[in-house]
Image (spheres, rainbow, N blue to C red):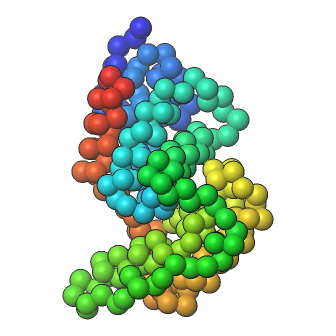
Amino acid sequence: MMSSAVPPLLGADWRDDELIARVLGGETAAFEPLMRRYNERVYRTARSIVRDEDEAEDVMQQAYVNAFAHLHQFHGAARFSTWLTRIVVNESLARLRRRGRDEVFDEERASEPRSAASWQSPEREAFTRELRALLESAIDSLPDGTREVFVLREVEGLSTSETADCLRVSDDVVKTRLSRGRAALRRVLLDRIGGSVHDLFRFYRPRCDRIVAAVLARIGA
């Protein structure tokens, strides 16, 4: 077996398929740039479902371990990012079921937003940061199904078909849920937040380093 010879971040410019081939060839360290490339999407996806930062990080670690263990099953029928996102969605939903909160997507529930009690306006100090936190709270309040679609489409920037593929629903369901999510948020927040939506649920370098180190330790890098 080849040694783990890829220094941190060396493969940052390599294509996904090149890194995958190296991992499958025995270069476990080649999995690191793959994680760093998709850490923010993985975090945003997990958090949109479990709605807790710490638990989202736990989901991330397990999802990456699962992806590494089953990497030989990835044959390129979809993009690696889509395949990975599916794993994150499955692990997140499994986590909810294990703690007795089987929140399976349901069209009727998706039409009923949760309580907006946590949407209260923040103090004016550090206004931009607090407004971002307010929008994150508002997104958290969206009903199951709608929330995940909104994060993948509007925050992460996936296409309708990519989102449908990740969540295993139809394109029409994605369009309907996205429309509902936009309508629920626009009235209160989106007109004020403007272009800052892409800065939501950021996964900054220290947290990225922590997750990468934990996963590499678990897979034996």
Q: Nearer the viewer, residue 201 or 96?
A: 96
Extreme-left residue of the structure: 125
The residue that appears at 42% across and 39% down in the rendered structure is 62
Up/down of 9 relative to 82, above or below: above
Extreme-front residue of the structure: 100
Q: Locate residue 218: give its quadrant.
A: top left
Up/down of 124 relative to 20, above or below: below
Q: Locate residue 136: give its quadrant.
A: bottom left
Up/down of 110 relative to 128, above or below: above
Quadrant in the picture for the N terminus: top left
Q: Locate residue 134: give its quadrant.
A: bottom left
Image position, residue 42 (x, y; %): 46, 50
Image position, residue 110 (x, y; %): 64, 72
The residue that appears at 56% across and 72% down in the rendered structure is 143
Up/down of 141 relative to 104, above or below: below
Image position, residue 28 (x, y; %): 39, 23
Quadrant in the picture for the C terminus: top left
Please state if 210 lies on the left or on the right of 202 as rendered: left
Q: Nearer the viewer, residue 66 or 197?
A: 66
The residue that appears at 28% across and 36% down in the rendered structure is 213
The residue that appears at 53% across and 35% down in the rendered structure is 16
Q: Is residue 19 visible?
A: no
Q: Is residue 59 visible?
A: yes
